[in-house]
Image: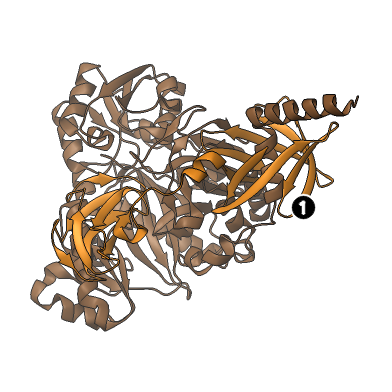
Amino acid sequence: MTISKLLVANRGEIAARVLRTAKARGLETAVLRHASEQEGPAHVIADEVVTIDGPTPVAAYLDIPQIVEVAKRIGADAVHPGYGFLSENAGFVAALEKAGVTFVGPTSDVIDLMGDKVRARAFVEERGFPVAPSAIEDDGPATFIERARAVGYPLLIKPSAGGGGKGMRVVRADAALEAEIEAARREGKRYFGDGRLFVERYIERPRHIEVQVMGDGKGNVVHFWERECSIQRRFQKIIEETPSPALSPEQRLDICETAAGIARAVNYRGAGTVEFIYAQDGAFYFLEMNTRLQVEHPVTEMVTGFDLVAEQLRIAAGEGLSAAQADIPQTGHSIELRICAEDATADFRPSIGNILLLDEPRGEGVRVDSGILDGGKVTTDFDPMLSKLIVHGSDRAQAIARARHAVQNYVILGVTTNTGYLDAILAHPDFASGDVSTGFLAEQADALTAPGENVDDLLMAVAALSDERLVAEVMQISDMHRKMGGWRN
Amino acid sequence: MRRIFQIGGEETECWLAHDGSRFVLNTPEGVLPCRLDPTTSPGGFVLRARGLVRDVRLAAGPEATFVHMDGRTYEVGRVDPAERLAGSDGGASDDRLVAPMPGVVVSVAVKPGDIVAAGQPLLVIESMKLETTLAAPRDGVVAEIPFAAGDSFGLKDVLAQLAPEED
């Protein structure tokens, strides 16, 4: 099958990023836009912008019948789902299939399997891959609490249908167990329409290490090395890098081959990511598999030189993988920073506003995947991530230095962002030495949000002198005084 | 001319004057001769003050001036001194529960007219993927719960209001 027209069923930076590659490959392109949505880079790049309706902008992007209808109406022969929204929705894949439209991604049965954490975990465990000690509610709801206790504290409660940290809770003492299970169940029901839970042993000071895989659906799977994503706030990644500073070359091969083995076991098609929890003692356990392109895929592109979206499109068109494992290098070091509209000093509260001035950093080894335009408006309709700043350096120290320079020179005025906070993380000695865990941001919260040198007087001078009305009034008075006093300059 | 600036939640009163040859900002910390000259970059200026020379980028919003300087971004709130004199907005602060961030109401445990005790849960909200229970700040009677379960609310929206305390 060939693909000649691609609909990107997403928005923001990822829609723009996918569209760029699609256009470079000579495809006709289309993208969605909700009526209330600001114009973004994707709308500028796409050949065609299709307006979608919904009670809320998010609901419109989740409306399967509407999006399938759009694909048919505009004559798209393939749909790229990006990440989030319908990217891991087996029902969407089935609906597209019925309509004769190619889904750029895995088959619906694999999405189904990996989307159910409990089934995925059992599948992986049965095939001899490592998983952490756990208790699954479905194995016997009546004895679930008892079995959860037997896993031992600290433990982590997760919704079976979950992802992205939603509804996850750490329990350190037995007294809190039952209340936390109920809270997690409510969140699971609300987010995923499914209140089933499982618990697993919480690994102290864990690192989050994941592996990019790509399969052709015909039994061939390669990996594109690992990414470390331990820098997380509220279980959500904000800095990712590759290679991981924690792994020895032997461990790196071990974890990457384990991931490829898991993908091979499901005869994986397309781009996917196998996530692991990495313990301080070097042991690692399967966490989940994300059956889509990840937010942080650019760091992999920077060190391997491959365009992962191009690979996805090749596979969807039946052209297969463009490289064998031996042809996939891991050169230098890459770091991604997620630029978010949020106030790191106020518990990461999302911020809103108009972008009054936007000036992106440029330079050697610097890439910006942005979802915003100068003059745009930031609302709470969508995720607070505005853009991604990705850098590449010959080694980790150079990558950190480049990331710091770039984030310091990323000018976004009009809405509070986390650029200063990201720079503080990069400047922290534990980050520099690579001694981090997923709890790093919480442990170092005070140090990372400490106010810098007091420059309030300079800021007030800037605010006063840039206020044209104030300056005019002051000059008028000065002029009056001068006349009264008979001065001359 | 007097101005009140707000940086990091703290307000400072300043007085900008021009002595015939230069601008002088009088702050509680002292007197700061200063000047600001445009550069060719969008929103770009050079600030000279305190013997320092700094490249800045700035943009003025309706209520605050955003400043990028030395690799950091700052927000300088501009408070109109006249508006400040107009004073408070009426209700005592402990009468109302204000949204600490935008979110969605998960459940509501009380209705207008209910008598509640300090610490009693009034409603559960969900913001940034986390559930939070909002409790009554004092003993009292519920006057208003403006949002129902499933409703979205914005930053600083009133989520619950107690009837004013009788003296």
Please indicate whether residue B133 sits to the left or right of residue A358 in the image.
Answer: left
Instruction: Pick whichever, A84 or A244, lies toward us.
Output: A84
Where residue B153 appears, as percent x and y from the top left, is 28, 46
Query: Left of A99 or right of it: where is A437?
Result: right
Write the residue at 28% across / 22% down.
Answer: A51
Callout 1 crowding tier (Cα within 10 Å): few <14, some 14–19, many ≥20:
few
Q: Residue at x 47, y 35 (%)?
A: A307
Whether residue A301 is visible:
no
The type of residue carrying mark 1 is Gly
Residue nearest the viewer, comparing B4 with A460: B4
Relative to A314, say whether A211 is above or below: below
Q: Is residue A355 visible?
A: yes
Q: Up-down: is A435 above or below B82?
A: below
Q: How is the image coloured?
A: by chain
Q: Position of residue A424 (x, y in %)?
A: 60, 56
Quarter holding the C terminus of chain A is: top right
Q: Quadrant of the N terminus of chain A?
A: top left
Instruction: Report the residue at 28% width, 29% height from top.
Output: A79
A60 relative position to A370: left or right: left
Query: Where's residue A315, x and y in %?
Result: 34, 34
Chain B appears in which tint? orange
Any idea which chain is the brown one in this picture? A
B134 or A423: nearer the eye? B134
Secondary structure found at label 1: strand
- In the image, A407 versus A452, the foreground residue is A452
The x, y position of residue B37, in whole percent, is: 76, 30
Q: Is residue A261 left or right of residue A478?
A: left
Residue under numbered circle 1 = B30
Q: Circle 1 marks a residue in which chain?
A: B
